[in-house]
């Protein structure tokens, strides 16, 4: 089974020759251009496209996609999610994780209580933060601080053990 990872979103057109602006989820931003093909998902439909060229442009990224030759075509892609096959990502050193690998894991505290499931992560500047969907729809924010808060990530078991009070 192919596992898709979202690496960005098309945020609009750039210029008149069909280039698109990209809101990249990669670090650094321009790494979104390293992956091709992309699978674009928009309005419930998916299609595979090839990246022909791209570059960092100011604080963002722009790209040329095969078959997109006009500003109008590029503008119609606004809002399309950019996915790639998880197998395209390079392997990471032990103890490092892609956000996509953490989403969906169960979070358990030291006492064995199930705090909920990771639904997303966010960057805060100081450290990343797990967004956990807890019981009764409650959202719990847990800072990604290795060894102090995040004690163990077990990808095969699909769990993260934390030293965190759910009432914090």
Image: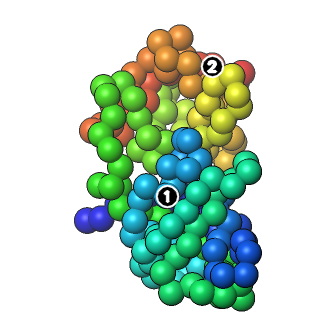
Q: Residues within 10 Å of mark 1 (few under 14, many from 20)?
A: many
Query: Horizontal placement of 102 versus 17: left or right?
Result: left
CB atoms of marks 2 and 1 within 8 Å? no
Does residue 126 lie above or below 107 as drawn?
Answer: above
Residue beneath label 2, please?
Answer: 165
Residue at 39% from the left image edge and 29% from the top image edge: 96
- Closer-to-camera residue (77/86): 77
Q: Nearer the viewer, mark 2 or mark 1?
A: 1
- Closer-to-camera residue (88/66): 66
Q: Position of residue 105 (x, y in %)?
A: 44, 41
Q: Position of residue 75 (x, y in %)?
A: 71, 81
Mark pair 2, 1: CA separation: 40 Å
Q: Position of residue 160 (x, y in %)?
A: 43, 30
Residue 168 showing in the rendered view: yes
Query: Horizontal placement of 56 versus 83: left or right?
Result: right
Does residue 108 lie above or below 78 as drawn?
Answer: above
Secondary structure of residue under mark 2: loop
- Closer-to-camera residue (65/108): 65
Does residue 8 lie above or below 154 as drawn?
Answer: below
Numbered mark located on residue 143 in the image: none
Residue at 56% from the left image edge and 73% from the top image edge: 64
Mark sitting earlier along the chain (2/1): 1
The picture quadrant where one finds residue 11 is: bottom right
Q: Residues within 10 Å of mark 2 (few under 14, many from 20)?
A: few
Q: Quadrant of the C terminus?
A: top right
Residue beneath label 1, please?
Answer: 33
Residue at 66% from the left image edge and 36% from the top image edge: 123
Residue at 48% from the left image edge and 81% from the top image edge: 66
Secondary structure of residue under mark 1: helix
Q: Residue furthest top?
A: 148
């Amino acid at each position: 089974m192919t596992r898709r990872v979202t690496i960005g979103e098309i945020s609009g057109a750039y210029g008149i020759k069909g280039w698109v602006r990209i809101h990249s989820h990669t670090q650094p931003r321009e790494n979104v251009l390293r992956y091709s093909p992309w699978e674009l998902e928009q309005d419930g439909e998916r299609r595979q496209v090839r990246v022909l060229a791209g570059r960092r442009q100011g604080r963002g990224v722009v790209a040329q996609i095969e078959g997109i030759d006009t500003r109008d075509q590029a503008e119609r892609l606004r809002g399309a999610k950019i996915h790639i096959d998880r197998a395209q990502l390079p392997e990471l050193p032990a103890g490092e994780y892609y956000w996509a690998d953490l989403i969906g894991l169960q979070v358990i505290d030291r006492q064995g209580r199930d705090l909920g499931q990771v639904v997303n992560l966010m960057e805060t500047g100081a450290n990343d933060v797990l967004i956990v969907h807890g019981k009764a729809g409650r959202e719990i924010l847990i800072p990604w601080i290795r060894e102090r808060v995040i004690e163990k990530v077990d990808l095969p078991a699909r769990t993260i053990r934390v030293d965190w009070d759910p009432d914090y």
